[in-house]
Amino acid sequence: MNSLTVQTKQALLAAIERAKNDTEARAVLLTGSGKAFCAGQDLREHAENLNEGRGLNGTVRDHYNPIILGLARMPKPVVAAVNGTAAGAGASLAFACDLRIASERASFLMAFANVGLGSDSGSSWTLPRLVGHARAMEMLMLAEPVPAARALEIGLVSKVVPDDELESSARELAERLANGPTVAYATIKAELTFGSGLDLANALEMEASLQDQCAETRDHLNATVAFLNKEGPEFEGH
């Protein structure tokens, strides 16, 4: 079920850092192997920490927070292909991605309250921005599974596809983004992330500053010339 042990979280963070720093990688696709996307924290490992008096053992600050920030701040698009259950921190991983495609068997479960915990892994920030305050409260307090069809209705995912089409659909989307203006995509991500916490005047100034940077790229120049010549743009990520 791809539960998150210390080893798994360390490997995931390392993979995120590699993707971030790999100039040849222009989009990121995150999915799970087997029948689940991610079942969240490995509770057996967690119970051992509790029994030995270690509490959370740093898992939120040392593991989950860097992973979520790594996905949110990734300077290229991140697509989540949710192939099954996404629970607790596993659901939060999907929410931290830029776009989410789900298979028909996927479901989302904010399971924290079921084990006497509040939310973590960024879900108190990402979830209300996806579905609104009231639905986020409902999902976190009632801790009931949200099936794929309902997830599409409330805006948790942008598309639901049959199970056997998920891999190809998600890859097609990731490749489309990889062939797009990735510098502009990174700017859009930064604008939306930081703009949500700013007043209008500061958001406008941030947009102007980032737009200046985009205007200096070859992608912008080439796309502008292509538009004037009635040609399709080709983006290089520079």
Image (cartoon, rainbow, N blue to C red):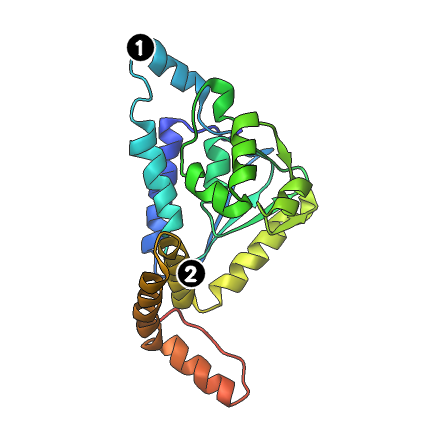
- Residue 32 appears in the rendering: no
Q: Residues within 10 Å of mark 1 (few under 14, many from 20)?
A: few
Where residue 90 appears, as percent x and y from the top left, is: 48, 34
Residue highlighted by disc 1:
52
Residue 160 lies left or right of residue 201; in this view the side is right
Q: Height in image: 35 above or below 71?
A: above
> In the image, which is nearer the foreground, mark 2 or mark 1?
1
Tag 1, which secondary structure?
loop
User: Can residue 4 be seen at all in this image of the molecule?
Assistant: yes
User: Which residue is at 40% across, 14% downward?
Assistant: 47
Amino acid type of disc 2?
Answer: Arg
The answer to which of 131 and 75 lies nearer the viewer is 131
Quadrant of the image occupied by residue 1 = top right
Residue 173 quadrant: bottom right
Of all residues shown, which one is farthest toward the top?
Answer: 51
- What residue is shown at x 51% (from left), y 30% (from top)? 140
Vertical comparison of 183 with 63: above or below: below
> Where in the figure is residue 200, as x and y percent of width and height?
37, 62
- The C terminus lies in quadrant: bottom left
Residue 26 numbered mark, or none: 2
Residue 231 at what x, y percent from top left? Answer: 54, 85
Q: Quadrant of residue 14?
A: top left
